[in-house]
Image (cartoon, helix red, strand yellow):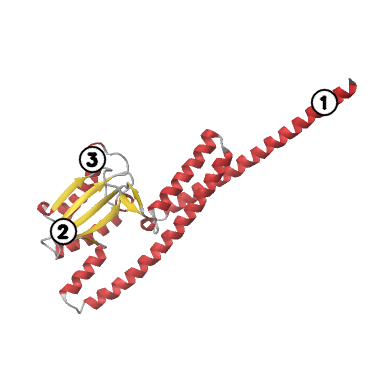
Amino acid sequence: MKRLIIFSSLLLIALIFFASQNDFAWASKKSEVKVDISEAKKLMEKLERDDELKEFIPFKNYYDAKIYLDTASYQFNEEKEYLMAGYYAILAIVEIETTFANARARQARYKKQQIEKDFLKKLALSSSKKSGMKIIMMEADLQKDGSNYKRVLLDRIIFNKNSFTINDKGKEILNRIYAVLKAYPRSKISVIGHTKAKDSGNTHSQKKADALTLYFTKNKGVSQKRIVSEGMGNSYPIEINKKIQSMDRVEIVISGIK
């Protein structure tokens, strides 16, 4: 009987010991995951504050990083699934670092293109008017789309955050597009707003299109007869990296350029 009591006591002590060790391991893991989530948040804030890289950030990488970070926070705070939270926190860190790398590569390619454009622009000064027109088209960054020319402008590039106010970068882009309209006075322009989320009555997307239209008509004197302003909501997703996605954007389509 005495041996049984001693054995039971030792067993209880062992269980308490292993339980305390297990609790310590989970507490340590929780602390480690919390640090990883904090690091991911700091990297995301750094990315979003980098004005020089802002326009070069690949949407897909940025979107994936946001999803991973949000999932990590949810698993940590709501589900208390620290293993999964840690997994998504690491995914977020990797994706944010990848986003930084891709954005810098895009920025480098852009600078290369600018150097080439400047060279061609200087070359065109002594060339014909037709060559000058090509330079204007290049600066506006319009892409051939059938018989028309098109450019996609992301909301986060042309608008101030959570508003329909066009920022300085947006005005710079629109001024270059206006130069094309001025060079081709018979051309016409369609300004089409799109949203990522469902847009009841296409109200939000229409306001975006109207904001750009007003800039062309009021600030640049473009005739209202040359412009069509439309809000399409999220009915027309766009292909990015071979994936169809809805995006907050405004598309510029110019017709009548010959």
Q: Is residue 152 toward the left or the right of residue 101 in the image?
A: left
Against 133, residue 219 (above or below) is: above
Residue placed most toward the observer, 88 or 227? 88
Crowding at label 3, few (<14), some or many (≥20) Cα neighbours within 10 Å? Answer: some
Q: Amino acid at mark 1?
A: Ser
Q: Which SS class for mark 3?
A: helix
Q: Amino acid at mark 3?
A: Asn
Query: Quadrant location of the C terminus?
Result: bottom left
Query: Quadrant location of the N terminus?
Result: top right
Crowding at label 1, few (<14), some or many (≥20) Cα neighbours within 10 Å? Answer: few
Q: Is residue 129 toward the left or the right of residue 81 in the image?
A: left
- The residue that label 1 is drawn on is 9
Residue at left offset 23%, top offset 40%: 202
Q: Are marks 2 and 3 in contact (CB under 8 Å)?
A: no
Residue at left offset 78%, top offset 27%: 12
Residue placed most toward the observer, 169 or 123? 123
Mark 1 vs mark 2, CA separation in Å: 88 Å
Location of residue 192 in the rendering, given as x and y in whole percent from the top left corner: 22, 49
- The residue that label 2 is drawn on is 255
- The residue that label 3 is drawn on is 202
Against 56, residue 194 (above or below) is: above
Task: Looking at this view, name the residue that lies furthest to the top.
Answer: 1
Q: Which SS class for mark 2?
A: strand
N-terminal-most mark, 1 or 3: 1
Location of residue 84 in the rendering, given as x and y in whole percent from the top left corner: 55, 41
